[in-house]
Image (cartoon, rainbow, N blue to C red):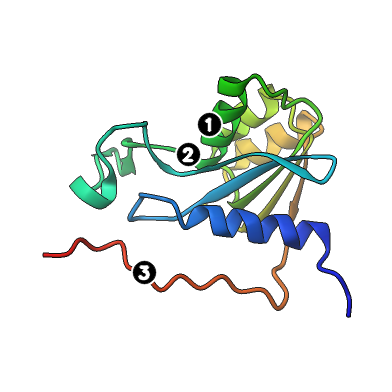
């Protein structure tokens, strides 16, 4: 039996983390890895103790929900909160990072970004990753499926 490659293992972890998302529009998960060890994780959701999209709906401004903190940012902020360095790390995220997260990832010193799904891949984000020598790579999930059978709907 072949072992699961590291890239698929960490991508599966990011998919599992995404199940904690409180966003009703897109569930995203991220894990930050150093030397094949997870040092932080994050999912898209509201600020701690804040109102959540699953409870109060999305707070939309110019076509974007501004209630949530993105998964990548939450993982980076978890490192900041607990004093964990992010320089020279890898980031595994379920969806290609948005432009704002791209800039945060670069500034945090992440060197490689692995993602499973394309999602509004911004041209400037791609350019900035290349310009900053941050390697990006799409990871295919072969023979791995995370199934979540619980609904985000409230009981009435």
Name the quarter where the N terminus is drawn: bottom right
Mark closest to the chain's N terminus, 3 or 2? 2
Q: CA distance from mark 3 to mark 2?
A: 22 Å
Task: Please say if the residues under marks 3 and 1 sit with CB atoms less than 8 Å apart.
Answer: no
Q: Where is mark 3, residue-wise?
A: 150
Q: Nearer the viewer, mark 3 or mark 1?
A: 3
**Side of 97 relative to 135 (left or right):** left
Residue in the foreground of this view, choosing between 30 and 131: 30
Per the image, label 3 sits on a secondary structure element best described as: loop
How far across and how far down the image is residue 149, in percent?
Answer: 41, 74
**Side of 130 relative to 14 (left or right):** right
How far across and how far down the image is residue 129, in percent?
Answer: 72, 35
Residue in the foreground of this view, choosing between 74 and 149: 149
Residue in view at x 83 percent, y 63 percent: 5
Task: Please say if the residues under marks 1 and 2 sit with CB atoms less than 8 Å apart.
Answer: yes
Q: Where is mark 2, residue-wise?
A: 70
Per the image, label 1 sits on a secondary structure element best described as: helix
Name the quarter where the C terminus is drawn: bottom left
Quadrant of the rendered image containing residue 135: top right
Q: CA distance from mark 3 to mark 1?
A: 31 Å
Q: Where is mark 1, residue-wise?
A: 100
């Amino acid at each position: 039996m072949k072992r699961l490659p590291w890239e698929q293992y960490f991508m599966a972890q990011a998919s599992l983390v995404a199940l904690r998302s409180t966003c009703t529009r897109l569930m995203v998960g991220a894990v930050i890895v150093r030397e094949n060890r997870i040092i932080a994780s994050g999912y898209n959701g509201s600020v701690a103790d804040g109102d959540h999209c699953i409870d109060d709906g999305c707070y939309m401004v110019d076509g974007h929900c501004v209630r949530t903190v993105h998964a990548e940012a939450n993982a980076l902020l978890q490192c900041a909160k607990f004093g964990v360095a992010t320089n020279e790390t890898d980031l595994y995220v379920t969806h290609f990072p948005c432009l704002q997260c791209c800039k945060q990832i670069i500034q945090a010193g992440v060197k490689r970004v692995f993602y499973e799904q394309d999602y509004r891949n911004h041209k400037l984000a791609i350019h900035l990753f290349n310009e900053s020598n941050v390697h990006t790579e799409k990871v295919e999930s072969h023979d791995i499926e995370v199934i979540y059978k619980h609904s985000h709907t409230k009981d009435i």
